[in-house]
Amino acid sequence: MAVERTLSILKPDATRRNLTGRINAKFEEAGLRIIAQKRLQLSEAQAGAFYAVHKERPFYKDLVAFMTSGPVVVQVLEGDDAVAKNREIMGATNPANAAPGTIRKEFAESIEANSVHGSDSAENAATEIAFFFAGTEIVG
Ligand code: CMP
């Protein structure tokens, strides 16, 4: 098991309902450490660039509108197998399919307003972390 880092985003539906602390507790209880964190209002350009991989998908425009609809909290989580572990803690993208106890099962409103984003591979995690954080902002 390797110590990894992953990029996490608490989405506007989560900040709107004041869920930052309850979601962070889920990460910490599962053994992930929050080694960088900031609250941001994403611009359309930032959200569009972050989700550029989904540019051709039918939900892209709505996704960018949703991600700019309120503050987000961007974070770096560190721990053993952090990428896979975070995906387990988050649960399935669609909350209807998320397992009991997961963040999305407990908190997500819909497939779009699904409370959290997490990197899907170690390679993408490195790119996504660099998108939001300077090295000096990450304190492991
Ligand atoms: P996320 O992990 O942030 O990555 C892309 C996001 O697109 C995803 O979570 C969902 O919130 C959002 N999304 C909206 N509609 C869909 C859809 N039909 N299929 C997959 N993702 C969707």
Image (tube, rainbow, N blue to C red):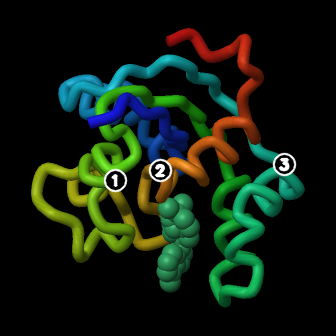
Is residue 70 left or right of 81 when viewed as pictured? right
Q: Amino acid at mark 3?
A: Ser
Q: Residue at x 84, y 48 (%)?
A: 43
Q: Position of residue 12 (x, y in %)?
A: 56, 48
Give how far apart the Cα atoms at labels 1 and 3 are.
26 Å
Q: Position of residue 86 (x, y in %)?
A: 34, 45
Q: Position of residue 31 (x, y in %)?
A: 23, 25
Q: In the structure shown, which secondary structural element does the residue marked by tag 2 occupy? A: strand
Q: Residues within 10 Å of mark 3 (few under 14, many from 20)?
A: some
Q: Residues within 10 Å of mark 2 (few under 14, many from 20)?
A: many
Q: In the structure shown, which secondary structural element does the residue marked by tag 3 occupy? A: loop
Q: Nearer the viewer, residue 81 or 76?
A: 81
Q: Earlier in the sequence, mark 1 or mark 2?
A: 1
Ligand 1 under 8 Å from disc 2 Cβ = yes
Residue identified by numbered label 2: 118
Q: In the structure shown, which secondary structural element does the residue marked by tag 1 occupy? A: helix
Q: Amino acid at mark 1?
A: Arg
Q: Is residue 118 above or below residue 16?
A: below
Residue identified by numbered label 1: 87
Q: Earlier in the sequence, mark 3 or mark 2?
A: 3
Assess whether mark 3 and mark 1 are in contact (beta carbons under 8 angstroms).
no
Q: Is residue 38 above or below residue 140?
A: below
Is residue 28 left or right of 131 when viewed as pictured? left
Q: Position of residue 117 (x, y in %)?
A: 49, 52
When asked about the image quadrant of residue 42, the answer is: top right
Give how far apart the Cα atoms at labels 1 and 2 are.
6 Å
| Label disc, if present, on residue 43 of the rendered structure | 3
